[in-house]
Image (tube, rainbow, N blue to C red):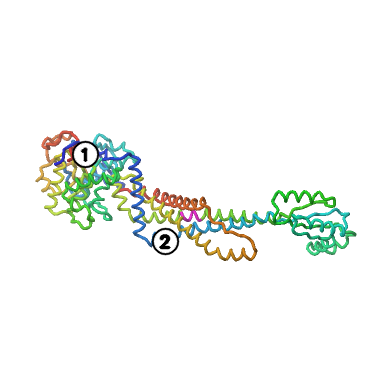
Amino acid sequence: MAVTRHSDAVAPVRSSGPFTSWLARHFRTAIGSFGRLLRQPFASLMIVLVIAVTLAIPAALNLIVKNVQSVSAGWDNALDFSIFLRRDVSETDAEKLAEIIGQRADVELVRLITADEALEEFKRQSGFGPSLDQLRDNPLPQTIVVRPGAANTSQSMILLHEELGNLPEADAVQVDTEWVQRFHAILDIVRQAITIGAALLGIAIIVIIGNTIRLDIQNRREEIEVTKLIGASNAFVRRPFLWSGFWYGLFGGLLALTLVQYGLFLLEQPVARLAGLYQAGIVVKNLSAGEMLSILGIGVALGLAGSWLAAARHMRRIEPR
Amino acid sequence: MIRLEDVTKRYPGGQEALSGLSLSIDKGEMVFVTGHSGAGKSTLLRLIALIERPTRGQVIVDGQNTRRVKRRKIPAYRRQIGMVFQDHKLLYDRPVFDNVALPLIIAGVGYRDAGRRVRPALEQVGLLHKEKQNPETLSAGEQQRVGIARAIVTRPKLLIADEPTGNLDPDLSLEVMRIFRRFNEVGVTLLIASHDISLIDRLGCRRVDLEDGRRVEDAFEDDEFVADESVPAATGEPPRWP
């Protein structure tokens, strides 16, 4: 028989520090929860798939917007200048001036819109045709539209803008940025819409995981009762369920990344063909490392949130009878 | 170790499970609570385990008034008490070893350290060779012994058992009672609810008879608040678990 000794029921045998044992306990619970998911592979896979698709949709849309933005960023350098000439400049002078401007190295294309052409176009588009016929002379100026060369930097663009404005014949120079601004505004709206949609989908994930954990808690009701009966705290019985939520979120996130990567792979060739047609060096942008990490982080956070809500709600109600 | 002062427990339906019950059990005593079903045996144990709280009166366990144990502190309170149930309340999704280790895991003992305590506990109930089996494959008597091993693995000072032999035949019942007796010999206080009067009388322990939530008489006619001198281990010392 072993040596008889006094023992204390409250102080358990411990060989390591409290933090190490806390870690070890969590590690065991995490592995245990993981094993439980593996024992129901089909059900677990379905949940992970649902989470993955829900995460992948906003991630993919966001990626598309990001790519469109990177392509359209180049358009800022391909803006046209409209030079409105003074009223006393004749059409012939305007033609000469256009030719001179066209010879500049930083200009790609020049087009003259004569005052008559402009008036004709205005008549057609405004619908004021007959009333405009009453005008004794044309109030519109000659206009030279200048397309700067693609090699321009934003600094040389400013310089060009200035020089064109300083021409003695020029009354005003206008940059046709409006449509680009509109396009960017639309992109902003799309991005906002994606954010709102992503938030809604995030709520959906919380509900899905919460419901799964709730069912899991109900199935293990007896086990929870027994463990509580022999002294388990709410935190102890909650822990494996929180880990389940963690795993669902993590694997959902990983699968979402895989789906996005597969989508990019499928798009690679068509984009290359399109880029070839435009003779432009379009490179499809992938998610950055930070974005990938945040998808995983969001998955895990939503998983934990869902399981926490379910566990907090239902665990308290299960008390030994 | 346990003191009840004028304890009444009334259930929401209005029926009184215990009516003004007073009782004192000293450290190191082994006491049986008997009575017909519905006499209040289970309620008494449930009040001690803080599964329920008394409607009136005080329940004092090891110097702690259960009234002052807050809801959040109930788990820590329960860990000080070993509990054995009629239906064993084992978990059938894990082997015997894990079942017995559960109270240690709950208390935060590492898995490897737990093994050093689980094996002696299983040895005391004679089931060391079955540690890897699932409880489902064991007989009712063996399952109850697993339940007992789980109750003592944290080496508690107090063990309460609700009809621990309720589902067992006489031979197995006697064996379970002998195991309890051995715990008592090392100084554990035991409170056992049972209706098996013939078995209890063979053991010669103190008996508290309940009827309609009141005491009928103590089988040993000693004063309510005086220790049972017939129990040799009733010294007030903490148990000397082997």
Q: Could you tell me if the residues under marks 1 and 2 are in contact, i.e. CB atoms within 8 Å?
A: no
* Residue at image location 76% in from the left, 50% down from the top: A161
Q: Is residue B112 magenta?
A: no
Identify the residue under disc 1: B157
Q: Nearer the viewer, residue A31 or A318?
A: A31
Task: Sort mark 2 into few (<14), some (14-19) or many (20+) by Cα contacts within 10 Å.
Answer: few
Image coordinates of residue A259 in percent, x first then y, are: 48, 60
Whether residue A10 can be seen here: yes
The residue located at (50%, 56%) in the rendering is: A201
Viewport quadrant of the N terminus of chain A: top left
User: x and y percent of residue A193 in the render?
Assistant: 58, 55
**Residue A185 visible, this angle:** no
Numbered range of the magenta stretch: A201-205
Task: Choose top left, top right, bottom left or bottom right for residue A182.
Answer: bottom right
Residue identified by numbered label 2: A46
Mark 1 chain:
B
Q: Is residue A252 above or below residue A269?
A: above
Q: Residue at x 47, y 59 (%)?
A: A258
